[in-house]
Amino acid sequence: MIKTFKNIFFFTFLAGSLSAAAQVTNSSPYSQFGLGDLKGSFLPQNRAMGGLSMGIRKPGLYDNINLANPASYSSIELTTFDIGASMDLRKLSKSGVSGKNQFNSTLSHITFGIPINKFSAISFGLVPYSDLGYQFKNSGLVDTNRVEYIYGGEGGISKAYLGYGFRINKNLSLGFNVSYLFGSLKENRAFEFVNDLNAFNSRTQYKQSVSGLSFDYALQYSANLSEKTKLILGYTGNAGNDLNSSNNIVTTRYRKNIQGEEQAAADSTFFFEGAKNTIKMPMTHTAGFAFEKTNAWLIGADVSYSKWSDYREGSINPGLNNSLGLAIGGQVTPDASSINSYFKLVDYRLGFKYDKTFVKINNTDINQYALTFGFGFPLPRNRATFYKINFSAELGQRGTESNNLVRDRFVNFNLGFTLNDKWFQKTYIE
């Protein structure tokens, strides 16, 4: 078992290292808006069900970290550790012309859940908040010279969180997460002469460093419908918060050689450092439910709303739209106590999600759809220690080719390793 753990940990660490070296974890032109492509606070077991989370507490025999609803922490009975990686394949198309397949990978999360007593637990960890990654260009003429306008961006925002969940009584639980958001977003705007090697090209680089606190509050209410079935209602909200932003801008001139390779910068024509701004984040609300039969199945739905029209970067209103999301999903475990068939112990998950994103271009809403599925593979137990590998896949599309826009088709894979154990408990010797 220790060998299995080491192999899984090595795989997730390797995937994260590959991403860190590339410094790009997204390849969508729609990530250039706001703070990038929002990742959502979901582990693979939630993503496989379309992002279902509000009514999720302990869906099966294993303790689960559901950081999207911190009220769920009150169901954690064993110390829980969850680490994972994500990978995505993406293809962009415009006006019937498709680009090349793009591949990215990253270490997606590392989280802990630790019970305080029979009624409460804390959770903490590090997860991605948003990703920025795109590259595209347009051509034109200046006098008789052919030129290219090149746009690119990379970077992202990470979220370190600490949360607490506790039961008020046997039915009602409350919780909260305090998160620290931090990271940098880098964007480039270049103007290049295609055929004139003597001409100076120009590039302006923008770097935005972001940091600040965020606070989420949550509740869950569980009602028994029968001896083995129950209904769980959940809600999570954020009243909006302010982030700090520091901006640097530099413009350089450079030439390219006959092979098209960029030469060292000739000079800097503009430099500005340390402009301070306050980023106003939107109010968000998510509510949902889940019907659950203990250790057998669950099904549910969530609805989310974010008021991105209130988003501001200093005094600038980038004109984002309010977003709306829907998640529907479920899980089935054929026989959680089976001793004759391993596949009856596996969790089978399926879901669907729809998002009306905060982006609107050419008077067209940029919507996103995805079909999701996944599995939870239990590993052999070691006394009071439980292991599970969670896998999820998302097959989806964002945007459209109508109105001269870009269609972004993607397949996202997420892999997580969950461990439940009795840590931090005293050993008594008679």
Image (cartoon, rainbow, N blue to C red):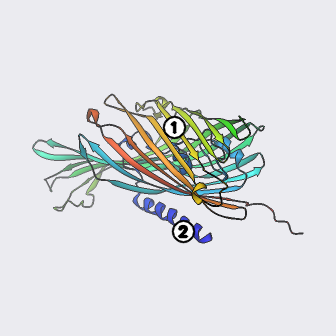
Q: Is residue 394 above or below residue 34?
A: below
Taking depth in this image into account, of 272 and 195 the one nearest to the observer is 195
* Residue at the farthest front position: 340
69 on left or right of 211: right
Residue, disc 1? 327
Check disc 2 and give the amino acid type.
Asn
Task: Report which quarter residue 297 is drawn in.
Answer: top right
Residue, disc 2? 7
Residue located 14% across and 42% down the image: 141
Q: Is residue 306 above or below residue 102?
A: above
Distance (Cα) linking label 2 and label 1? 33 Å
Percent position of residue 370, x then y: 43, 42
* The C terminus: image quadrant: bottom right
Taking depth in this image into account, of 126 and 2 the one nearest to the observer is 2
8 on left or right of 78: left
Is residue 272 among what the camera can see?
no
Packing grade of label 2 (10 A; few <14, some 14-19, many >=20) is few
145 on left or right of 59: left
Check disc 1 and give the amino acid type.
Ala
* The N terminus: image quadrant: bottom right
Q: Is residue 4 above or below residue 150?
A: below
106 on left or right of 176: left
* Circle 1 SS class: strand
For the residues labelled 2 and 1, say whether their Cβ atoms are less than 8 Å apart: no
